[in-house]
């Protein structure tokens, strides 16, 4: 009996130690997103969302994100990229996507977090597209379509760069470029048929790993997703039209949001 008690205490202690260890090693690899507007760094949550981080880093390490553009800008919601690249032709070309990654909706979609975009009605459909949460979207995205997987967080003043991009004028060149952020480009140019160039598009020159230490930024305390339905889709994942690898599960919510704030 004494032996069993000692074993129970040992197991309990081991579990506690593992839990404490997990809470402090939840944050690891740091990457830098380098754009023609400015750079920002992202702390990836390797321990919390290992499959998603591995998937993201596979695109980073292969150079797939070189010349990627932010093709979708919705102030008060998200800034999205990773699916298209500018190679001196407009519109940008699709970036080759690998196999979908399993959904890992353990963290909350609060402002400054990075999450995977996916196909509506399919929680396990994320590939190469990702977005930055411009605001706290927990109420919108933590439970829809199985929950959107948060796998990183913008560090320091990096959101200043994101906010600068979100503040740019947006232009409609048809889906998926119907909310395309452009700099040094006017409505007159757009109406005259002028095509944006690399000087106008928000181009990611590269995403590079700048710190692969096992424990980086241990003081970060990512908010956990406590509302996701383990059953997956909540039924509100359909949207009109074929919009490809976008946040299709929240398009209807989008329209409602825009109507509410429109003057």
Image (spheres, rainbow, N blue to C red):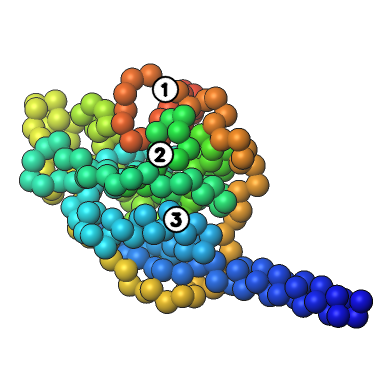
Between discs 3 and 2, the one toward the N terminus: 3
The residue indicated by pointer 1 is 239
- Residue drawn at (77%, 72%) of the image: 12
Cα separation, mark 1 vs mark 3, equals 28 Å
Q: Secondary structure at mark 2?
A: loop
Between discs 1 and 3, the one toward the N terminus: 3
As displayed, is residue 88 above or below residue 177?
A: below
Tell me, yes or no, if residue 12 can be seen here: yes
The residue indicated by pointer 3 is 51
Where is the N terminus found, in terms of image quarters? bottom right
The residue indicated by pointer 2 is 125
Between discs 2 and 1, the one toward the N terminus: 2
Q: Position of residue 172 (x, y in %)?
A: 24, 29
Horizontal placement of 117 versus 68: left or right?
A: right
Horizontal placement of 13 versus 29: left or right?
A: right
Q: Quadrant of residue 84?
A: top left
Cα separation, mark 2 vs mark 1, equals 16 Å
């Amino acid at each position: 009996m004494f032996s069993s008690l000692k074993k129970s205490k040992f197991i309990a202690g081991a579990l506690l130690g593992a839990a404490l260890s997990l809470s402090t090693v939840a944050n690891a690899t740091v990457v830098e997103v380098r754009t023609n507007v400015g750079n920002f760094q992202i702390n990836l949550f390797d321990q919390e969302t290992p499959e998603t981080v591995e998937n993201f880093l596979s695109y980073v390490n292969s150079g797939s994100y070189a010349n990627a553009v932010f093709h979708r800008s919705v102030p008060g919601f998200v800034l999205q990229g990773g699916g298209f690249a500018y190679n001196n032709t407009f519109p940008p070309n699709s970036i080759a996507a690998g196999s979908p990654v399993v959904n890992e909706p353990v963290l909350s979609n609060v402002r400054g977090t990075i999450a995977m975009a996916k196909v509506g009605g399919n929680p396990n459909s994320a590939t190469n597209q990702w977005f930055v949460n411009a605001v706290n979207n927990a109420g919108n995205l933590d439970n829809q379509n199985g929950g959107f997987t948060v796998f990183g967080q913008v560090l320091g003043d990096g959101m200043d760069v994101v906010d600068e991009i979100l503040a740019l004028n947006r232009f409609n060149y048809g889906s998926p470029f119907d909310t395309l952020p452009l700099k040094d480009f006017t409505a007159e140019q757009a109406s005259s048929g002028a095509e944006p160039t690399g000087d106008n598009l928000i181009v990611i020159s590269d995403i590079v790993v700048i710190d692969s230490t096992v424990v980086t930024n241990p003081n970060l305390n990512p908010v956990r997703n406590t509302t996701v339905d383990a059953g997956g889709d909540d039924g509100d994942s359909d949207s009109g039209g074929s919009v490809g690898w976008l946040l299709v599960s929240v398009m209807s919510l989008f329209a409602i949001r825009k109507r509410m704030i429109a003057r």
